[in-house]
């Protein structure tokens, strides 16, 4: 991770990333409470308005329907006059939902499969590895497109499909780590004292897996957000009127020459969020590697 | 390391699994084609007739085998949109996608080689850390954003290249290559990072070898040592990753072709999805997946052939 | 400190210090070395592993690691030019051309994926600007010179297809390609079979005489330099602790360490299963220096003064004999 040389904390960049992610998460959670226009309210007087445009007749989502207030479009408006800030915050819900929940499926499902495969070995392991290979055989994006095509593009399908796509990678991480751990002394010791498999798994192995898997999970989250962005960009993600970052970027394409901010602002926000996940995930991974080598 | 025979077997099994899953997706999931064809006013009997016509009333395993047989014969059905046979439609578009992949990978290599070599040479120096940071930031940019940035910079601001449009190679080679520059760049500007990291890592190990010191003792200048002595032994992982990336890029191609309106397979898939052209979607997905699996298996097998020979040579001498 | 007053001085090293960073501290790999070498003379440098002799060789050639620090008062004068004060590009004109090196392990020193012929011709092309054909011919001649049969065939082979002895011959051919005035051989036979060692050493001797080349022969085995060098310097912990014309050194050594090295040489005439005399203890940690003489922890003749103060090089009984010891062997 660039910039973090200390063996201790995450480094300045890591903390900034964490703060940013918390900011995004918080905004998304409290989206409806903000004094901003509704995300689908169109302002025909201010189409593709530049960031910083002031308007005197804007209806806010917190205010009464007819009440018009003075408001500054801090990040401008899109091609239909909708406030970019508002759409960003509401769109963050989609991105974060996908970014956090999809890897969670992989984390739990893949982690469990990989851990059990690495621990019990034998036929079960071969089966799991083979199944994972089949899933890995599919080019991810294509599978995502096809599945959402057949099943319908809604948030649930998106999360589940993406989640399933990450299962092989998580299972690989879990299995590799379990294979290393099961031969370590403390596991042998536990077995000698007569502990059952379940206890060993729960007490000794799984806690040690968590750090590795979380590090990978954060990197997966970054990737998921980009994947969701790509799908929405193609118009095949969560359907309108729900805003999504990818969709916003796509909408801004037609005015890229006159009003690049419509695409570039959501692109920038997505970039910062993905970068933040990558920085923390990578930082965790490096910390874990560094500590391992001192062993 | 599996033998080549085993790898081939695994390849066939995976292909079968892929075809089975693709087939099942169409035929088990809700959204029965017959309803689509029948329309809203169709009665139950009409639907049943349609099902019988399409052969949907037979056992699924039977239908799978039949479908597989037809597929192997090159019959993937016809596009509901254009009536064009799916198989030939795909074959026509294939060269465009291949050209895109090849050019973007070459561009990525062009960026990755000097970056990787130089960062390995002065590892942990200022340039190395700069390249490392740039790389780290770059992979946080999705390809479609990179495409828009490229369009904004080169097409809109600088006016060097057109944003969309495609000319076939035999009509006008120069225009053809021009139409690939921005799309390939959008992919290459992200792909170079992976290649650079792999090359850097291998080269750092190589540069610690005694024969590099000996090359210095010959009085050779650093650039000669890097290019003639250090590069070849460090290329193995690079070449392998290069091959594997091509498979992965098939997914990227879908987005990039759509943005830049290149008539390749990816765009065909997307257009089919927009138009709900079931058979075309199925055919595209199938062929893209088979291509992906084939490339990965081929690279895997080639690596298996190269590697033991080098391993053998090293152990023989060491 | 001339090793042979008759020849013209070729190389003069003064107070050479080379420090290598190791974490927060430095390793004093070369700690104040001075000597002179005349044209056509052979100097042997002997010492245990880790005494800094390889670093000394690298320092002479200008091949120190990039983060190495050379002491400010050091001088390496080669044919009247101070190598330490030359720019890198100028230095590279000398390296491999007027001054060349043969490394210890020819298997790792030769590029495994490059043909033998190319590894020779590239030196010729680079330094002498030879064309492909001319370089090829000259390379064949060089292979013949070092005693390799079927040179044409060897040119197209890779290092792993040759035996250890042949590989070292190739390395020597490479070193001699541009007719250097000085050849540094860093443990040239250590990685080779015993039977091949003598061949290589003899080859080096012959070539040296033929080309009137100066040579520095580095080894951990004092027996190797016997009869093959004009003078010998014994190194310990980065310093020269005794130096003399070789014959004189063997008959009149005064430094206990030299004596210990001498006794460690296995002799063919010894009965079978004779235990090799070891030098007890470990080579010193070049970061943490004991005060006083570096050899004192392991010296059989250690006296209290040895631990307190590091001995300086003093002249001995022969004009070219120097040693650094408080309690030399010829005192009671």
Image: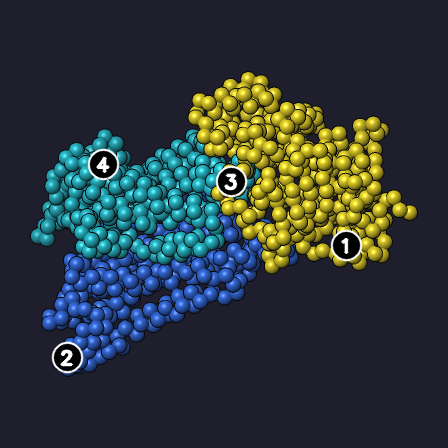
In space, the residues marked 2 and 3 are separated at their CA atoms by 74 Å
Residue C217 visible in the displayed image = no
The residue tagged 4 is B95
Q: Secondary structure at mark 3?
A: helix
Residue B116 x/y as whole percent: 42, 46
In the rendered image, the quadrant that contains the N terminus of chain A is bottom left
Q: Are marks 2 and 1 in contact (CB under 8 Å)?
A: no
In space, the residues marked 4 and 1 are separated at their CA atoms by 78 Å
Mark 4 or mark 1, whichever is nearer to me: 1
Q: Residue C92 has which mark?
A: 3
User: Closest to the observer: A235 or A47?
Assistant: A47
In the rendered image, the quadrant that contains the C terminus of chain A is bottom right
Mark 2 or mark 1, whichever is nearer to me: 1
Identify whether B197 is placed above or below C276.
below
What residue is rendered at 29% in x and 43% in y?
B104
Q: Secondary structure at mark 1?
A: loop
Q: Residue A56 has which mark?
A: 2
Q: Residue C310 has which mark?
A: 1
User: Closest to the observer: A256 or B74?
Assistant: A256
Pointers 1 and 3 within a single chain: yes
Q: Colour of chain A?
A: blue
| Circle count | 4
Q: Residue B208 has which mark?
A: none
Chain shown yellow: that is C
């Amino acid at each position: 991770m660039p910039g973090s040389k200390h063996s201790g904390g995450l480094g300045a960049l890591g903390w900034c990333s964490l703060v940013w992610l918390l900011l995004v998460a918080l905004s998304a959670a409290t989206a409806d409470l903000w004094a901003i226009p509704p995300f689908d309210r169109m302002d025909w007087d201010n189409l593709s308005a530049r960031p910083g445009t002031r308007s005197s007749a804007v209806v806010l989502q917190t205010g009464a329907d007819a009440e018009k207030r003075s408001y500054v479009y801090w990040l401008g408006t899109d091609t239909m006059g909708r406030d970019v800030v508002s759409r960003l915050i509401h769109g963050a819900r989609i991105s974060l939902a996908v970014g956090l929940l999809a890897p969670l499926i992989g984390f739990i499902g893949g982690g469990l499969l990989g851990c059990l495969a690495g621990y019990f070995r034998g036929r079960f392991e071969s089966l799991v590895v083979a199944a994972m290979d089949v899933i890995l055989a599919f080019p991810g994006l294509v599978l995502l497109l096809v599945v959402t095509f057949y099943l319908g593009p809604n948030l649930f399908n998106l999360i589940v499909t993406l989640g399933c796509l990450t299962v092989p990678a998580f299972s690989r991480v879990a299995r590799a780590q379990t294979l290393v751990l099961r031969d370590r002394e403390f596991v042998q010791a536990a077995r000698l004292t007569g502990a059952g498999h379940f206890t060993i798994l729960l007490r000794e192995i799984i806690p040690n897996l968590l750090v590795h898997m979380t590090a990978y999970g954060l990197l997966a989250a970054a990737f998921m957000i980009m994947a969701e962005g790509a799908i929405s960009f193609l118009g095949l993600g969560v359907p309108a009127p729900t805003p999504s970052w990818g969709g916003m970027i796509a909408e801004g394409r037609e005015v890229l020459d006159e009003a690049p901010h419509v695409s570039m602002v959501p692109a920038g926000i997505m970039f910062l969020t993905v970068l933040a996940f990558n920085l923390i995930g990578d930082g965790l991974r490096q910390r874990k590697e560094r500590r391992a080598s001192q062993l | 390391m599996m033998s080549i025979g085993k790898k081939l077997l695994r390849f066939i099994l995976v292909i079968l699994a892929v075809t089975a899953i693709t087939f099942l997706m169409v035929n088990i999931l809700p959204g029965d084609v017959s309803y689509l064809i029948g329309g809203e006013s169709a009665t139950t009997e009409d639907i049943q007739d349609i099902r019988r016509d399409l052969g949907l009333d037979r056992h699924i395993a039977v239908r799978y085998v039949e479908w597989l047989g037809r597929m192997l014969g090159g019959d993937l059905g016809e596009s509901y949109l254009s009536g064009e046979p799916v198989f030939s439609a795909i074959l026509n578009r294939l060269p465009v996608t291949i050209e895109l992949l090849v050019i973007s990978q070459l561009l990525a290599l062009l960026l990755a080689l000097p970056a990787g070599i130089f960062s390995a040479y002065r590892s942990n120096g200022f340039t190395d850390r700069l390249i490392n940071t740039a790389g780290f930031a770059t992979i946080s940019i999705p390809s479609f954003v990179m495409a828009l940035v490229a369009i904004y910079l080169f097409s809109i601001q600088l006016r060097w290249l057109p944003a969309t449009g495609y000319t076939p190679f035999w009509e006008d080679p120069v225009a053809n290559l021009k139409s690939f520059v921005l799309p390939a760049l959008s992919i290459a500007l992200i792909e170079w990072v992976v290649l650079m990291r792999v090359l850097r890592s291998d080269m750092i190990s190589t540069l610690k070898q005694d024969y590099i010191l000996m090359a210095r003792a010959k009085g050779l200048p650093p650039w000669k040592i890097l290019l003639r002595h250090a590069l070849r032994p460090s290329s193995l992982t690079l070449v392998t990753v290069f091959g594997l990336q091509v498979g992965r890029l098939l997914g990227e191609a879908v987005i990039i072709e759509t943005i830049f309106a290149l008539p390749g397979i990816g765009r065909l898939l997307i257009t089919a999805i927009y138009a709900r052209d079931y058979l075309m979607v199925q055919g595209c997905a199938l062929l893209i997946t088979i291509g992906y699996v084939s490339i990965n298996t081929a690279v895997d097998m080639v690596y298996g052939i190269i590697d033991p020979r080098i391993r053998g040579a090293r152990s023989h001498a060491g | 400190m001339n090793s042979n007053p008759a020849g013209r001085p070729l190389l003069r090293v003064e107070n050479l210090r080379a420090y290598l960073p190791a974490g927060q501290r430095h390793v004093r790999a070369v700690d104040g070395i001075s000597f002179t070498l005349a044209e056509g003379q052979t100097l042997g440098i002997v010492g245990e592993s880790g005494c800094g002799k390889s670093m000394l060789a690298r320092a002479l050639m200008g091949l120190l690691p990039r983060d190495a620090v050379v002491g400010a008062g050091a001088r390496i004068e080669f044919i009247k030019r101070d190598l330490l004060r030359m720019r890198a590009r100028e230095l590279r004109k000398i390296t491999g051309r007027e001054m060349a090196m043969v490394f210890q392990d020819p298997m790792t020193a030769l590029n495994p994926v490059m043909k033998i012929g190319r590894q020779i011709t590239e030196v010729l092309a680079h330094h002498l600007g030879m064309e492909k054909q001319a370089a090829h011919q000259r390379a064949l001649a060089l292979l013949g010179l070092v005693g390799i049969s079927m040179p044409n065939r060897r040119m197209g082979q890779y290092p792993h297809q040759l035996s250890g002895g042949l590989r070292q011959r190739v390395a020597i051919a490479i070193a001699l390609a541009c007719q250097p005035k000085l050849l540094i051989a860093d443990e040239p036979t250590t990685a080779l079979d015993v039977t091949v060692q003598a061949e290589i050493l003899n080859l080096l001797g012959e070539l040296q005489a033929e080309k009137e080349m100066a040579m520095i022969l580095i080894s951990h085995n004092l027996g190797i330099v016997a009869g093959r060098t004009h003078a010998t310097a014994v190194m310990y912990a980065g310093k020269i602790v005794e130096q003399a014309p070789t014959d004189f050194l063997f008959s009149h050594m005064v430094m206990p360490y030299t004596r210990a090295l001498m006794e460690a040489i296995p002799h063919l005439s010894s009965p079978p299963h004779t235990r090799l005399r070891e030098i007890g203890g470990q080579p010193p940690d070049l970061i943490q220096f004991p005060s006083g003489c570096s050899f004192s922890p392991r010296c059989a003749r250690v006296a209290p003064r040895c631990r307190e103060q590091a001995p300086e090089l003093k002249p001995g009984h022969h004009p070219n004999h120097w040693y650094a010891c408080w309690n030399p062997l010829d005192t009671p």
